[in-house]
């Protein structure tokens, strides 16, 4: 039902400078896999058939990463390292159509999503922000798809945040709550601690009906010079119901240094091939 996913990867990644100067932030690895690949795998494992990257002309390595590298493949074949080939071109990527659309100016997340309009057309679609990393039995996107199937309304993933950190996120004003499903009454981008309508913040997974594009088109630049996705959702609320789904599972904000390191340590401790050594190293440090 949801066959297309938009992955905005055009941002400047200023919090990761200088690492993100020549290497896109989304290509930074957690252990041995770039952040963007975790999001692509989450999308594909939930039935997505077309991935639309909103990228920038400076981020060529993202396209290269998902293209077939014939030279490297033949070197690995010749040196009998075929077992690594599946890592290079995972089987699940074979049937997937990858699109690359340039966002020439970094005018914000809403502006980035708007660039996907022509390819998405009238279909409902998912948005995954690759710097939010999720691990759960049932993936974050899968939880949203379940809700979309019930409601046919746009639905966003949310989680509870400590009030001291609320100013970093989009925050919803909850209406009726049924278990993990919340009707969204209002939404604000990065409110102050005092103004926040709740402690329920948006995290980086969404499903939208194509009607969101109309509202993105009419959304003005905010005081930071960006077109915010949150502001378009606020407008959408005047015409349609929007739901929020409380995400159940682990979430790492890899757009921040703390979250990035947290995810790295967690996955290193789960990786059987290195966890023993990593535990030893951590013990020594602590
Ligand atoms: P972030 O705000 O976390 O990324 O956007 P950023 O702007 O690159 O990072 P900082 O704040 O400067 O450190 C979330 C996602 O949206 C994309 C980013 O690439 C990231 O994946 N994005 C953001 C765009 O594609 N275009 C934009 O104009 C802004």
Image (cartoon, rainbow, N blue to C red):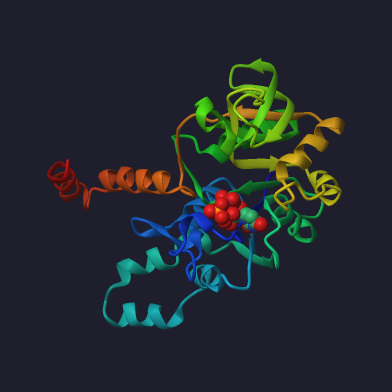
Q: Quadrant of ligand 1?
A: bottom right
The x, y position of residue 48, in whole percent, is: 61, 51
Quadrant housing residue 58: bottom right
Q: How many marks?
A: 0
Residue 249 visible in this rendered orientation of the protein: yes
Q: Depth check: give the residue in front, 123 or 53.
A: 53
Relative to residue 97, is residue 81 depicted above or below?
below
Q: Position of residue 134 (x, y in %)?
A: 47, 41
Residue 50 visible within the image = no
Can you say which quadrant of the picture contains the C terminus? top left
Where the N terminus falls, by quadrant?
A: top right
- For residue 199, above or below residue 251: above
Residue 275 place in picture, x, y as percent: 21, 47
Q: Position of residue 94 (x, y in %)?
A: 53, 64
Give the residue at x 63% y 73%. 57
- Of residues 224 and 182, the one nearer the viewer is 224
Q: Residue at x 49, y 74 (%)?
A: 68
Left/right of residue 71 with respect to residue 223 in the rendered view: left
Task: Judge left or right: residue 172 versus residue 74.
Answer: right
Q: Nearer the viewer, residue 216 or 141?
A: 216
């Amino acid at each position: 039902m949801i066959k297309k996913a938009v992955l905005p990867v055009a941002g400047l990644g200023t919090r990761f400078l200088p690492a993100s100067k020549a290497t896109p932030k989304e290509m930074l690895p957690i252990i041995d896999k770039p952040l963007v690949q975790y999001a692509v795998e989450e999308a594909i494992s939930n039935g997505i058939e077309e991935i639309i990257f909103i990228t920038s002309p400076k981020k060529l390595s993202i396209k290269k990463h998902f293209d077939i590298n014939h030279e490297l493949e033949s070197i690995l074949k010749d040196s009998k390292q075929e077992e690594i080939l599946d890592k290079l071109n995972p089987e699940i990527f074979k049937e997937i159509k990858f699109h690359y659309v340039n966002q020439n100016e970094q005018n914000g997340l809403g502006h980035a999503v708007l660039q996907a309009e022509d390819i998405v057309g009238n279909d409902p679609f998912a948005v995954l922000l690759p710097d939010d990393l999720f691990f759960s039995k049932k993936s974050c996107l899968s939880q949203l798809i379940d809700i979309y199937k019930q409601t046919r309304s746009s639905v966003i993933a949310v989680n509870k945040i400590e009030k001291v950190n609320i100013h970093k996120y989009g925050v919803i004003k909850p209406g009726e709550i049924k278990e993990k499903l919340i009707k969204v009454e209002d939404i604000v981008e990065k409110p102050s601690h005092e103004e926040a309508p709740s402690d329920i913040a948006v995290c980086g997974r969404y499903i939208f009906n194509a009607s969101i594009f109309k509202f993105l088109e009419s959304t003005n630049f905010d005081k930071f010079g960006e077109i915010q996705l949150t502001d378009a959702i606020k407008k959408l609320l005047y015409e349609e119901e929007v739901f929020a789904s409380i995400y159940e599972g682990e979430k790492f904000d890899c757009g921040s240094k703390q979250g990035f390191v947290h995810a790295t340590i967690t996955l290193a401790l789960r990786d059987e091939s290195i966890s023993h050594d990593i535990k030893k190293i951590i013990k020594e440090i602590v």
